[in-house]
Image (cartoon, rainbow, N blue to C red):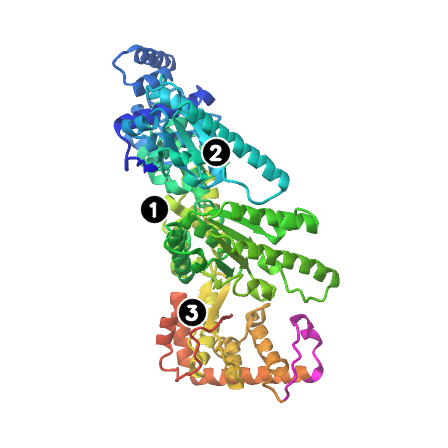
Amino acid sequence: MTDLLTAPAGALSPAALDLQRRLLREVVRRNDTFHVTGEVLPDAEQDPARSRNDADKEAKANATTPSKSPLQAAFANRKFHRPVAEDLAPEELAALIERGDDPWAAGIYTSGPIEDVPIRDLLAACGLVRSLGSDGTLDGLLVLGAITLIPVRSSTQRDALHNALEDIVPTYLKLAGRSEMQPSLAVLRMDDPVASGRRDDRIVAQREIERRRKDFDGAVAKNTPMLVLASGAEALPDIARRLPVQILPWPELTADDVVEVLRATHSHTGCLAEDAIRAALPPAGRAATLAPILWRRALMEASPIRAAWRLAELCAEGPGSKGQTLEDLHGQPSVRAELEALVSDVEAWRAGRLDWSDVTSSFLLSGPPGVGKTLTAAALAGSADLHFVSTSYGACQAAGHLGDYLKAMAARVDEAIEQAPSVFFLDELDSFSRRDGGDRHGSRYGVSVVNALLTDLTRLADAPGVIVVGATNHPDRVDPAIVRSGRFDRHLRLGLPDRTGVAAILKGHLGSQSRKVDTRPIVDQLLGCTGADIAAVVRGARGFARHRNAPLCQTDLEAAAERVAPKQTTAALWETAVHEAGHIVVAAALGLAPPRGARITARGGEVEVDLPQRLTRDVLDRRMAAVLAGRAAEGLILGSIGHGAGYGDGSDLEVATAIALKIETEWGLADHLIYAPIPAHERLRLPEGLRRRVERHLSTGARRASDVLARHEQALIDIALTLQRERDLNADRIADLTRLLRRACEDGVSNAPACTLH
């Protein structure tokens, strides 16, 4: 039989807040003492000797005055000094807070944080007080023979919380006035059975499980009240099923808790500039998931305000950051919608309303580097509260030879299965390339690796609660057996963010600092950048601010953006707009489907188009003219043609050449039916006859594009001016601009793959 205990919602009661502050101070006191420094923040012109004597007298008086509350007495015993802020004019106070100093936390002769932060115990202390916020809840916990379960699914988190509670529960009971109770409260941990892994490891784990069950049985025999951490009620020993068990959910960290932690670690006066700190803090949920070493890094800052800034920065860093959710996934609306539906399915499965076999649980993410594939997988895990296991071909190969690789990959698969519900994220999926390659040694190695991965994917698919997410820059290079349905059921493509996405990513990474800057001037400048590029801009801006020893400002943000994506001149913008408008005009005039979007980016321009599902010779000839229309537009309007149309893989000339080659060698749309694909690296050695035929296709397409543009020169200029002004045109805007040019098109492209013209 189980009963659910509920912690009080909202702010702590005054008594609970007083207890929380005393407990946090006691945790800090056991690890370090505040140190008196020679560094004094600006204060009124006072005599230092007299100020020190006055402060010592005040501390002594406070320590002996019986009317002091427990909190005040604790402050007095710690020799708290009056805040520097009391001796400052309002403008001086505001200036110090603006630069990140906290005159309310700094005493006249003391400043700075403690040197060794027991962050694990501090966060556990916050949760303990919040979960036992009322005397009634605590009384129920301490009844003889009471069994109270704190469910913690992750074994890593369970271990850390168990160790922390073992340290702080005795102190908590003493401060709460319950230390005389006998027998004392026992803090125990129950682990789940280990079903896989090395035999020796399983034996050791099983012995530890048996030892913990003996501790549980011993506590039951002695009628000792217990606080038990386990994945759930099913992980408790069998004897618990015959006994009443009360469940105590562990509360989420709140902003109030973070403020109190900073008060304990940084305030020498018991005071804080709370408004400034709260404005700077990241969401508490993100802070709760930071590793202890990152918390310590933040709490090394000299003031609580700077510590809050640092916490916000650490929570916003990098696409793999802990605590990310799908709310942090900007500029990918269709991908986000599909994964939010999956989160709902996971919740239904957890509640027993849906069978796991009915959940779509495998996804292939593709897209260029930096668009957020890792962030997407981590955000899915964060939104669904799933254990996140991340690995890659390279990470496992670094373990050593083939046997070491196989063990390393199997260990990560085991972790995902054992920690289910979980997300298993496999990056660099294109490293698992086709097994029919020409390199005999590499092929043999590749066959072994791919075959092992297929076995691992089958194990993951058979494990309820495991979601598999693969990521690749090149889905066409992955062995087909890996990406087929059943192993990866859904293929989601991530693209570069549009203007709205860029603005949202900037705001997300800036966090609370976004209120102090205007991101609008740099949004257009960052079009075409990946989410990783935009994150680098924010990190660079924070770096500039740190070097100035000042808060982040507009100049920092603009300077950082200039490093990543230098502003284009008006002339360069016009040249790009003319080129991209050429693609739009010819596609419309020749009856091709309207582009999905067109934009001028930090790295040039692009027009995203759909390819029809059925390619005929007529469609391909029109497509080739549209691909070559950018060059033709430059020649018509600018009087000369730049090199951009032939700048590397994916350029206009590369795309047009590939179309012409496939017409001749693959698709059976030329004067012969031979199928003889030619790899890209063989194009330099084309037979002379084939080269002439390909060149004929290209020349015909280029002439056709020039003729169309000459007939519609004014439309070309109008669309180029609009693109130069607006920088980012969506499908509806393009359709409106080309309405008079378009003619009926029956190609049917609603589900067609995307292609980008440059």
User: Mark 2 falls on what kind of element?
Assistant: helix
Quadrant of image for the N terminus: top left
Mark 2 or 3, nearer chain start: 2
Q: What residue is disc 1 on?
A: 515
Q: Which residues are magenta?
A: 672-689
**Residue 2: x, y in percent?**
34, 37
Mark 1 or 2, nearer chain start: 2
Q: Which mark is residue 286?
A: none
Horizontal arrangement in the rendering, residue 96 relative to residue 676 (left or right): left
**Residue 71: x, y in percent?**
31, 21
Q: What residue is disc 2 on?
A: 160
Nearest to viewer (mark 1 / mark 2): 2
Determine the image quadrant of residue 741. Answer: bottom left
Is residue 118 among the parts visible in the rendering?
no
User: Mark 1 falls on what kind of element?
Assistant: helix
Q: Is residue 684 magenta?
A: yes
Q: Look at label 2 and name its amino acid.
A: Ala
Q: Residue at x 45, y 58 (%)?
A: 357
In the displayed structure, 111 sits above or below 723; it is above
